[in-house]
Amino acid sequence: MRLAGKTAIVTGAGSGFGAGIARKFAAEGARVMVADINAAAAEAVAHEIGGTAQVVDVSRGGSVLEMAEAGFALFGRLDILVNNAGITHLPKPLEEVTEEEFDRVFAVNAKSVYLTARHIVPHMKAHGGGTILNIASTAGVSPRPRLNWYNASKGWMITATRAMAVELAPDAIRVNALNPVAGETPLLASFMGEDTPEMRAKFLSTIPLGRFSTPEDMGNAACFLCSDEASMITGVALEVDGGRCI
């Protein structure tokens, strides 16, 4: 029960890595708000883990404010924020990504981190600290071709994590990131362009441990970084990638 007594909001928690993180947090004793743009998915995970569902569009300031205020009202004090919600554009030459696709990727993957910080950091400061975990990607460290602007958004997230960590340390707020490799999530087909045995084999050939990351892998790593066991760790971007970035 490493998170006993803790409260957490996990965005994008209706599926994939976010659901894995929410399940692990609940299993370790945390009270969890399962936040997702998909109401039915959020409700299903919340019901499974005994948490609370919250519909949120992390790219919109008003929606993020509603989520934050609902969390404060529910918990009284928010200890952990996990910025997991993310999207990608389909693999294509960088100059062929439309402006609409670019704006959407950066709104969900980058602007969301700003918006949650804007509405949640003041609360954490007022209550003596907290922990923020940003779900970045190996794409921000070792980019794959044809995913250019997705790669860039995750590189932004890694730099934002380090900048937030050094600024918020005096307020006892730790900020870290996880860099997963492609995983068994709804985004996998989008990363690959098409989900075929041949494309899976191509992707797996770049991962020394020979498998995709799983929601359980991410839950375990997130639990450690958000627990008191990691109380001296801030500003790191931990690769959970089976050796992909070596």
Image (cartoon, grey):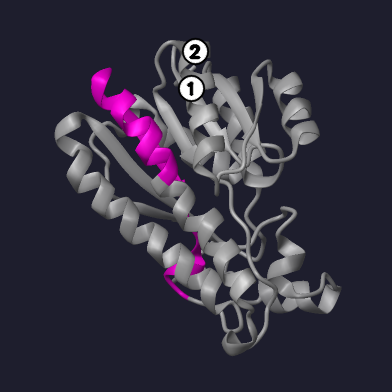
Q: Quadrant of residue 157?
A: bottom left
Q: Whole-percent x and y of residue 41?
A: 77, 35
> Residue pushed farthest left?
170
Q: Position of residue 76 (x, y in %)?
A: 43, 10
What span is in magenta?
115-142
Check if mark 2's residue and mark 1's residue have beta carbons within 8 Å: yes
Q: Are there few (<14), some (14-19), or many (20+) residues within 10 Å of tag 1?
A: some
Any part of residue 240 in sight: no
Q: Amino acid at mark 1?
A: Glu
**Which residue matches tag 1?**
69
Mark 2 neighbour class, 10 Å CA radius: few under 14, some 14 to 19, many 20 or more: few
Vertical position of residue 17 compared to residue 128: above or below = below
Which of 104/234 is in front? Answer: 104
Residue at (37%, 59%) from the top-left corner? 158
The quarter in which the C terminus is drawn is bottom left
From the image, tell me which residue sits under label 2.
73
Q: Nearer the viewer, residue 133 or 211?
A: 133
Q: Is residue 241 left or right of residue 120?
A: right
